[in-house]
Amino acid sequence: MRLWQKICICTLLFFLIVFFGSSILMIENNVKENFDRVLRRTADEQASISSGMIRYASKNSAKDLGEEGHYQKYIVEYLESRINSQGIYLEVSENGKAIYSNMDIYLIEEETENTMYTVMAQYKVLESDEKKYLRLTSMVTYGDHQLLNKYMVDVTDIYANRDRQYSFFIKLSLGVSVLLIVGIYLIINHLTKSVGLLTKSVRKMKAGNYREQVSIQSKDEIGELAESFNEMASSINEKIADLQRKTEEQQRFIDNFTHELRTPLTAVVGYADLLRSTSFEEEFSQEMGERIFREGKRIQRLSELMMNLVFLEHNSFQLVPCDIGRILNEAEVTLRPALDRMNMNLIIETPKEPLIILAEKNLIINLIVNLADNAGKASEEGDSIWLRAYEAAGSVIVEIEDQGKGIPEEEQSRVFETFYMVDKVRNKKNSGVGLGLSICKDIANVHHAKLELKSKEGEGTIIKIIFPCYEHDTNTG
């Protein structure tokens, strides 16, 4: 059963229970009030007749002293003059013998209520020929005589009115129920429309459409649910996009690794087979051996870089406060001999005051040396390379600047990808395999730092390492 159907049925049942219960209570209370009103009036009339009857009989019987039973004559005379209303019945008896009666005893066939009592009399509701009568019975004392006064009125209209109210109520409840069902259906259908939209979106997401969004503008709980659903869908979509990107990177990594490994292996196998199968002069054999050695070193270098990537990915490092100026000076010691051999200038610009960062010093030196080495590979003889450090906007920034060929704008976003190399930098002196900058990015991530690249073809490249600034300057490395 659908939710809207459950809501319709439950609402209708609850309404009918409340409506029927309150209406029945109202009808019965109305009948009771009418009946009590008639009962009080009848009791008053009976009491008035009884007192009037005794007064009249007492007054007139005094004239007939000595005449036994003449009081009954005056009682009858009084009652005949008093009881003239249609639907009113009266019987006065003494010792079971009727003195006066206008009742047709055969009218009363069946008693429908137990005996009830008012203050001065007892009453019953009797039924005859589909009519109902209220009968009050009271005792009247006349001297030594005990008279029984039975007074009865027709109350059929009270119960007929109750039946008419019930009949009207049933018709009203049927009409109200139909209107209620239609109204509830329209209202709930409108309110649950948003739930239907969410259900459709969930099904689309189940089918693989993780970009699905729900357009619900309400400010109620459904609107909050829709907003949470959209946030969840966006998060899932981002995660999937990230997984797809990582999958593509892994596939590209495997393809590039396979390519980079196949080239030197092919050369090694070819040169070795040539040496194995052919006799050459010592000088030629030595040249072949040198080529095999170079390609073997290339494989060794590739293996080392791969191990470095795995090492950075699966290890945690203790970061301690370090002065970036000292780190640049130590990097200079490593870089200067190689740059001197290539007739390149290395310019170090360190701040006057210590700039402290949290770092693993050897990794940061490796990072700076890697970036400066790439700068050297992209530069020509006589060019300059700058290493500088400064503080800006609450961060410590290290810049590596060169005067090399620069990187095309369309390739700048990919230079930190694993195995990626800019073709224009790929020359004889650059025997890299495209892992250096990827390792640099991983080292920066270890230190919660960012790498920014700014380059223009023919003018050179600037790479910024942006570290979070560390306030304390004690225990520097």
Image (spheres, helix red, strand yellow):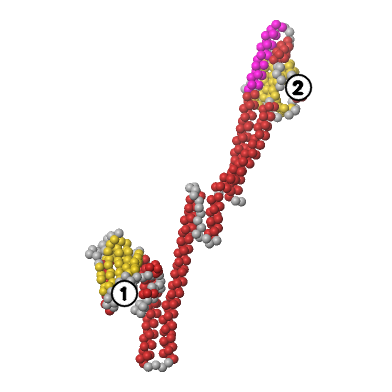
Which image quadrant is residue 291 in?
Answer: bottom left
Left or right, 301 with reference to 208: left
Write down the quadrant of residue 129 in the picture. Answer: top right
Is 41 colored magenta in this rendering? yes
In the image, residue 134 above or below residue 290:
above
Residue 476: image quadrant is: bottom left
Q: Point out the residue furthest to the right here.
A: 106
Q: Secondary structure at mark 2?
A: loop
Camera sees residue 23:
yes
Q: Which mark is in front, 1 or 2?
A: 1
Look at 46% across and 59% down and name the residue there: 235
Magenta range: 39-64
Residue at x-position 64% and y-position 39%: 175
**Callout 2 environment at 10 Å: few (<14), some (14 to 19), or many (20+)?**
few
User: Disc 1 residue type?
Assistant: Ser
- Image spot of residue 313 (x, y percent): 40, 69
Of the 4 image quadrants, the one containing the C terminus is bottom left
SS class, disc 1:
loop
* Number of numbered tags placed on the structure image: 2
Which three-letter amino acid code belongs to the residue tagged 2?
Asp
Q: Of 453 and 111, which appears nearest the observer?
A: 453
Q: Main secondary structure of the magenta part?
A: helix
Q: Residue at x 66, y 21 (%)?
A: 42
Q: Which residue is mark 2?
A: 104
Q: CA distance from mark 1 to mark 2?
A: 135 Å
Residue 302 % position (x, y): 39, 77
Check residue 301 for magenta coloring.
Answer: no
Dot 1 or dot 2: first in sequence order is 2
- Residue 155: where, in percent of width, then height? 68, 25
Residue sitting at x 69%, y 27% = 156
Which numbered tag is attached to residue 379? Answer: 1
Q: Is residue 241 above or below residue 281?
A: above
